[in-house]
Image (tube, rainbow, N blue to C red):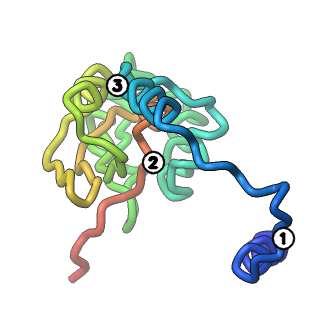
Amino acid sequence: MVLLTAIVVTISLGLIPASLEVPDPDENEIEARHETKQVAPVERGTSAALDGISPSIRAVLSRIKSRGITRGNVDSAHVERFSNHLVRVHPSGLIEVYVHVSSCAERDITALYEHEVEIEVANCELGIVQALIPFDEVVEVARLSFVQAITPPSYEHR
């Protein structure tokens, strides 16, 4: 945190030497970047994907995994017992989540469906997709390049 603060202060005070400044990309480079974003979503590494999954969901996934629960035995495993005030797990193994996305392009929504994501509501303006994800697909969904984070939904508490 101290290093980040030092970098921000250094940048804001203009203390970075001109030789370290990043040149503005030319028009062809911008167009090349735009074209690259048009291809199908790529996957990130597992470590980066795990960073995008909220700790409360990771804890539930860890408990499910430690009990040896798989798709094959999920119906008799009573995984709903892993639900808590933050994370809701359905008896079928679906987990209620917000998927924070950088894009709601058709190819991105298709990629979610390919991972058996059941979309309940998508708010592309806010970049949030409320969905149900099978417990064994959460990490794979988090690996998609357009997925920024996976968090529990905000529930009204009574």
Residue 136 seen in render? no
Badge 2, how many Cα within 10 Å: few under 14, some, many 20+?
some
Estimate the spatial distance between the alpha carbons at disc 1 and disc 3, rounded to whole Å.
35 Å
Image coordinates of residue 99 in percent, x first then y, are 34, 48
Image coordinates of residue 67 in percent, x first then y, are 55, 34
Instruction: Check disc 1 and give the amino acid type.
Output: Leu
Instruction: Check disc 2 and give the amino acid type.
Output: Gln
Q: Residue farthest to the left?
A: 121
Quadrant of residue 125 in the image?
bottom left
Q: Give the residue number, with chain letter if any, for mark 2.
A: 148
Badge 3, how many Cα within 10 Å: few under 14, some, many 20+?
few
Q: Secondary structure at mark 1?
A: helix
Residue 98 seen in render? yes
Q: Where residue 38 is drawn, which disc sits there?
A: 3
Q: Give the residue number, with chain letter if any, for mark 1.
A: 3
Estimate the spatial distance between the alpha carbons at disc 2 and disc 1, rounded to whole Å.
24 Å
Quadrant of residue 87 in the image?
bottom left
Image coordinates of residue 104 in percent, x first then y, are 24, 40
Q: Which residue is at the front of the view, 4 or 150? A: 4
Eye-nearest disc, 2 or 3 = 3
